[in-house]
Amino acid sequence: MNRVLVIGSGGREHALAWRLSQSSTVEQTFVAPGNAGTALEANLSNVVLDVSDFGAVIAFCHDQNITLVVVGPEQPLVDGLVDALSAVGIKCFGPTAAAAQLEGSKAFAKDFLRRHQIPTASYEVFTEVAPAKAYLQNQLFPIVIKADGLAAGKGVIIAENMAEAESTIEDMLADNKFGEAGSRIVIEEFLQGEEASYIVIADGKNFIPMATSQDHKARDNGDVGPNTGGMGAYSPAPVVTPEIDQQVAEKVIQATLDGMAKDGHPFIGFLYAGLMIDKQNHAKVLEFNVRFGDPETQPIMTRLQSNLDELCLAAIEGRLDQVSCDWDERFALGVVMAEKGYPFAYDKGNVIHGLNAINDEVKVFHAGTRLADDQITTSGGRVLCVCALDYDLKQAQNKAYQAVKQISWGSEYYRTDIGFKAIK
Ligand code: AMP
Ligand code: GLY
């Protein structure tokens, strides 16, 4: 029997660990560091581990005879956790540091896309203010300016006019307002259309698409307000038609896996392409993530019926062409409950009420929560993701919101329209 360690503490990791722990091949699942949700889950155990200390992770894996490590967030992937564990013979699911540059450096990703002729917005990369400003002279507005490095979803600015674009360039390149991540920038064409997430599991050569999904990145109803990590998601997403599915599988995903292999960095892990789909149904890559989406993971894992432990091992061993992936036919819809103020400053430490009243039809994944003295308190911006399943998306939405209304901590905030694009 297998023993699994999941790295991370968000809603994505709760959903991955929950699904892994239900695999028939898994006897025990640990989460480092986890959250209150993973602490309370019958088949999961939290572990206090500093996951940036690779030596400590290796020691824990040896000590506990861990047979599979699944890395949730991007930072440890970009920092080389997979390389470190693989080097000592521990099976670790996720891309190497070299392959993780697809997310770790936007300039790397854009140059990769251009070199391999994969559709994306036109762009240039800059490290100096003057040439960046000069480039703006011949561009249309709005224009998109991106900090090169990891910026926790805050590194993308859509500048409406020249003045805003120039000040963003100065903030990033001269005034260091985005830290090291902004010492190099990508300036790119603004694309119009509808956004979709396309997520696959890849073994370096082959891939299996995960169920389709759509995130809601803006904070407020109707897709307005500041950009966030994601305020809710549902799966499947009708925006990804069979035609788009085929186009993206071939021209984006397979082309990316082939390109990465050719460049000497075969990609193993979850690969997430953020896409913009235009009126002519052409998909262009907005960004890559080298991990599962959060909150897309929560509704997608709610629907996964296959053995996730086996899928991850098959990916590591390069035999994804020999396995398949089955999905619950029903829609899953997840509503993120956040602390008021998110994605800016917010309160922490509020006691969450109502979790016990939630019925079995709904699954509440935790993100920024903490368990202390038998109380569950808020400890992050995105606190919970409340997921429900139904054959009808509207019904799934109703069920999720009925549960949301039973949960409170005084300063909760959530969108009330998750799924609206598919429920017209
Ligand atoms: P990213 O982190 O690169 O996905 O960017 C965050 C968000 O900014 C995306 O989800 C889009 O809503 C928006 N965005 C990024 N790049 C573009 C683009 N070239 N055109 C229009 N919107 C964009
Ligand atoms: N939900 C978007 C992301 O995980 O990047």
Image: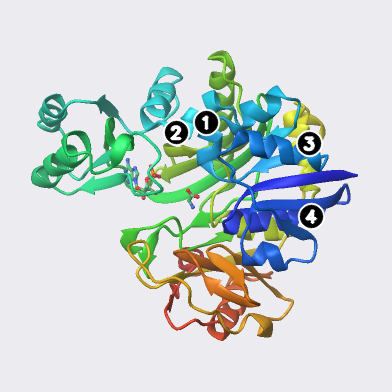
Q: Which residue is mark 4?
A: 21
Q: CA distance from mark 2 to mark 1?
A: 6 Å
Q: Amino acid at mark 3?
A: His
Location of the N terminus by quadrant is top right
Q: Which amino acid type is marked by label 1?
A: Ala
Task: State how far apart marks 1 and 4 are (Cα).
Answer: 26 Å
The spot of residue 76 in percent (x, y) is 55, 38
Q: Which residue is mark 3?
A: 62
> Is residue 153 visible in the rendered structure shown here?
yes
What type is the residue that disc 4 sits on?
Ser
User: 210 or 424: nearer the eye?
Assistant: 210
**Above or below 189: residue 335:** below
Q: Are marks 2 and 1 in contact (CB under 8 Å)?
A: yes
Query: Which mark is drawn over residue 104?
Result: 2
Tell me which label, 2 or 3, sits earlier in the chain: 3
Task: Tell me if mark 2 has few (under 14), some (14-19) or many (20+) residues whose alpha carbon lies within 10 angstroms of its own.
Answer: many
Vertical arrangement, residue 260 with respect to residue 177, above or below: above
Place of residue 24 in the rendered image (x, y in percent of width and height, measured from the top left): 88, 51
